[in-house]
Image (cartoon, rainbow, N blue to C red):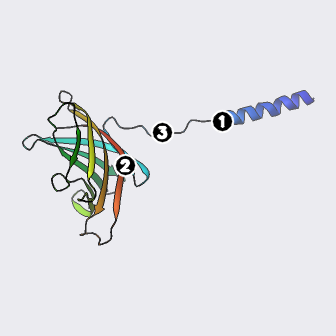
Amino acid sequence: MKRILYGAVASLILLSGVGACTAESVEPQPEFYVKATKDGNPWVVPGSGIYAKSQNEFFVFGEQRDGTVTQASLRLGFAVPTEQPLPTVTKAPTLLPTTWTVLVGGDVIVDGYTADSLSETQLLITRLDTVQKVIEGTFDATLRRDERWSKQEETIRFEQGSFRVRYQ
């Protein structure tokens, strides 16, 4: 009788242990994405890109939607590097500013942050495929809230960022 009782208890412990070891659900990363640690929190959103051929500039966009009419967009802009291998591209914010814009209804700007001279954006282009029209890279950026929205020194920090986007 004791053997059966010990066997039943051992089986229950084993089954409860197996049930407790379920894999964590990990959200799949989109094929084309912009991701970073945004103010200390993981941030992954679908990404896209635009190549302005006449100006020889790329723009990378990461769009965050929350299921309502509000959306936020990170824009990284940089001139096309001509050297090979591709160098680190650091642009003065006055030329191609990195921006974070919050929109309501797709066209009303309700908040915004921009990189200024005190907080440059660092970009490293790691891959540029002109046949498949895919660009990949890494970035770090500190953006300050535009004075239009607040006089306080508020910032958003994107660290260890990377992107893989298809451009048009």
Q: Nearer the viewer, residue 134 or 124?
A: 124
Residue 88 visible? The answer is yes
Q: Dot 1, how many residues are within 10 Å of its Cα: few (below 14), some (14-19), or many (20+)?
A: few
Q: Badge 1 is on which residue?
A: 19
- The location of residue 32, given as percent across then percent down, is 30, 37
Q: Residue placed at 33% from the left, 34% from the top?
A: 31
Can you identify the residue that label 3 sits on? 26
Question: Disc 2 or 3, which lies upstream in sequence?
Answer: 3
Q: Which percent across, then down, holds residue 34?
A: 32, 43
Q: Quadrant of the N terminus?
A: top right
Residue 118, image x, y percentages = 27, 60
Of 65 and 90, the residue lying toward us: 90
Foreground: disc 1 or disc 2: 2
- Please name the amino acid that badge 2 sits on: Glu
Residue at (23, 59) in percent of width and height: 117
Which of the labelled discs sits on residue 159, or is there none?
Answer: 2
Work out whether mark 1 precedes mark 2 in sequence or the reverse, and give the earlier one.
Answer: 1
Q: Secondary structure at mark 3?
A: loop
Q: Quadrant of residue 155?
A: bottom left
Amino acid marked by disc 1: Gly
Q: Quadrant of the C terminus?
A: top left
Left/right of residue 29 with respect to residue 143 in the rendered view = right
